[in-house]
């Protein structure tokens, strides 16, 4: 089925920050809440709360406490599904295809994909237009994952407005900040990383199941080298010349030094006035009205 009726479509791309938005990112071991306001200072500082055991009830209670403390009851919030809770597939067509044939083709691929999935699934798609190739990017996720996220938000006293997808949020950062196309971004979070490559006719990504959280506890060098080896392999396979780095690891100077020594890092992507931990919530908050 399409994305739940009460939730707006996944959006791509976005290009400006509107007057006011709450953005929420929920991970396995954290929640991050950020308020952006174009014409005034946010009413509260960005909030990140860590949960060692990933307990969902603890996340709900912690978010509820933030909502009560900062008087956010009933406010709309933008959020995103983690990359691990969805999948994005790209389908290519000639740029000369007419609208009716394109719609029929999209309808057919959606039916084919959903027929292969036994669980109830939500989906959305967007179109990347190149000079010769037209790409349809189809995002699919388990309805259970979407419901779990939106129920958490409602249980805390907020209203889920837009459910985005983490992969699209990262692409949106590059578009919003006008990174030279093509661009590649290595986003590092506590429990996994994402290597994404984007150009006008293609979008590819890999989820790297490596725990920065575990590494940060004891800085195990073998664990770190395994990460670099996997990223280097993906860079070669995908013919990537250099990458931008983003995410929680940007707060660790020692890690950054090793990153620069081992990978072709072109630069670091910040989260504006916020800590690098808020890279995703910051870009989620940038929406057109």
Image: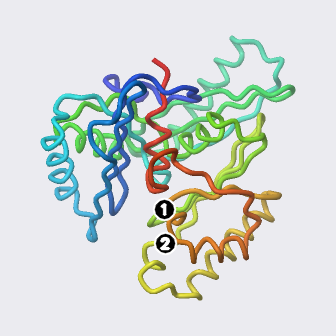
Kindly identify the residue that appears in the image at 59 percent across and 37 percent down: 172
Q: Of helix, strand and loop, which one carries label 2? A: helix
> Residue 192, percent across and down?
50, 64
Kindly identify the residue that appears in the image at 31 percent across and 44 percent down: 149
Q: Mark 1 and mark 2 in contact? Answer it, CB < 8 Å.
A: yes
Q: Report which residue position mark 1 lands on.
A: 248
Quadrant containing the C terminus is: top left
Mark 1 or mark 2: name the one nearer the start of the chain. 2
Question: 50 above or below 166?
Answer: below
Return the residue nearer the eye: 5 or 271.
Answer: 271
Quadrant containing the N terminus is: top left
Q: Residues within 10 Å of mark 1 (few under 14, many from 20)?
A: some
Q: Of helix, strand and loop, which one carries label 1? A: helix
Q: Report which residue position mark 2 lands on.
A: 212
Position of residue 116 in the picture relative to residue 78 (left or right): right
Question: 188 above or below 97?
Answer: below
> Residue 85, percent across and down?
44, 51
Position of residue 34 in the picture relative to residue 237 (left or right): left
Residue 184, disc: none
């Amino acid at each position: 089925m399409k994305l739940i009726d009460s939730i707006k479509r996944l959006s791509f791309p976005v290009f400006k920050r509107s007057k006011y938005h709450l953005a929420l990112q929920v991970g396995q071991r954290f929640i991050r809440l950020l308020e952006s306001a174009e014409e005034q200072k946010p009413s509260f500082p960005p909030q990140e709360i860590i949960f060692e055991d990933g307990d969902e009830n603890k996340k709900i209670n912690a978010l509820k406490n933030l909502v009560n403390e900062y008087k956010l009851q009933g406010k709309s919030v933008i959020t995103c599904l983690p990359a691990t809770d969805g999948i994005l597939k790209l389908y290519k067509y000639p740029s000369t295809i007419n609208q009716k044939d394109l719609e029929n083709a999209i309808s057919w691929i959606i039916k084919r994909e959903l027929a292969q999935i036994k669980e109830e699934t939500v989906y959305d798609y967007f179109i990347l237009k190149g000079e010769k190739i037209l790409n349809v990017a189809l995002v699919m996720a388990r309805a259970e994952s979407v419901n779990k996220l939106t129920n958490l938000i409602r249980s805390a006293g907020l209203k889920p407005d837009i459910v985005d997808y983490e992969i699209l949020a990262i692409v949106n950062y590059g578009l919003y900040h006008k990174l030279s196309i093509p661009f590649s971004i290595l986003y590092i979070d506590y429990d996994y990383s994402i290597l994404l490559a984007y150009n006008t006719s293609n979008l590819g990504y890999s989820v790297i199941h490596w725990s920065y959280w575990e590494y940060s506890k004891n800085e195990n060098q073998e664990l770190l080298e395994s990460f670099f080896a996997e990223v280097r392999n993906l860079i070669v396979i995908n013919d990537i010349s250099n990458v931008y780095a983003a995410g929680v690891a940007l707060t660790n100077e020692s890690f950054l030094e090793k990153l620069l020594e081992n990978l072709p890092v072109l630069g670091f992507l910040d989260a504006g006035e916020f800590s690098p931990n808020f890279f995703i919530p910051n870009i989620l908050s940038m929406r057109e009205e």
